[in-house]
Image (cartoon, rainbow, N blue to C red):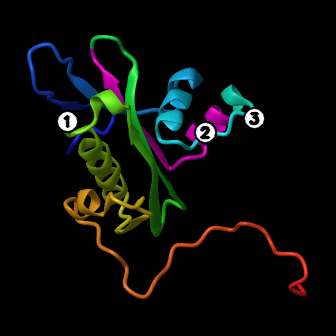
Amino acid sequence: MTNFTDIKVKRGGAKKAGITVRFVKDWPAKEIIELYEAGGWWDDSADDASLVKKIISGSFVFAVAVNEETGRAMGMGRALSDGASDAYIQDVVVLPEYRREGIGEKLINAIRDYCLSKKIKWIALVAEPGTEEFYSSLGFRVMAGHTPMRYMGIEQGNGK
C-alpha cells in the first residue's frame, strides 16, 4: 500500500530539487498563505496564522508538495469530507515557477488515493476555467446537468 505521508515526485533537469508530497496536520502559515496568494484566493484581512491552522486541521486531508532541498512548500491541495461517503478536492495550487512539472498531478493523485483508501469513491471538485483538460486527464468529468454554485448573499427586495 502507498505511504500517504511521503510520495516522491521526480522533477526534470539536473538543477531542480525533488519534491515530496506530504499529508500534514500543521504547516508554517507564511508558506500556505504564499500558495493561496499564488492561486489568487487569499483575503488580506484574515487572521493569518489562526485561519491557516483551522484550514489545515479542518480538512479531511491536507497535502503539501515539499521541496526536498529547502523544506519549503511548493504546492498544496486538500479534500473536505465527512469521511464516510463524499469528498471534495479544493485549493489545489502550485507556485508559478514549479508549474507544468507534474506536481499538481501528484497532489491530486495522492489526495484521490487517500480518499479511496478510506473507501470514499464519490470524489468531486470545481475546476477553474481553463483547467478542465488537466482534471480530465486525471479521471474527472463534467457532471452533466449540475451547476456549481456559491452563496453570495441574499439580494435586498426579493422578499426573502
* Magenta region: 51-68
Residue type, mark 1 in image: Glu
* Magenta region includes residue 52: yes
Report whether 40 appears left or right of 52: left
Residue at the disc numbered 1: 101
Q: Are marks 3 and 1 in contact (CB under 8 Å)?
A: no
Residue type, mark 2 in image: Trp
Above or below, 29 against 100 in this view is: above
Q: CA distance from mark 1 to mark 2?
A: 24 Å
Provide residue 111's location: percent of width, then percent of height: 35, 49
Mark closest to the chain's N terminus, 1 or 2: 2
The image quadrant of residue 21 is top left
Mark closest to the chain's N terminus, 3 or 1: 3
Say which element carries label 3: loop
Report whether 130 appears left or right of 8: right
The image quadrant of residue 140 is bottom left
Visible residue check, residue 48:
yes
Residue at the disc numbered 3: 45
Where, quadrant-wise, is the C terminus in this rendering?
A: bottom right
Q: Residue at x 42, y 59 (%)?
A: 128
Visible residue check, residue 6:
no
Picture disc at residue 42:
2
The image quadrant of residue 87 is bottom left
Say which element carries label 1: loop
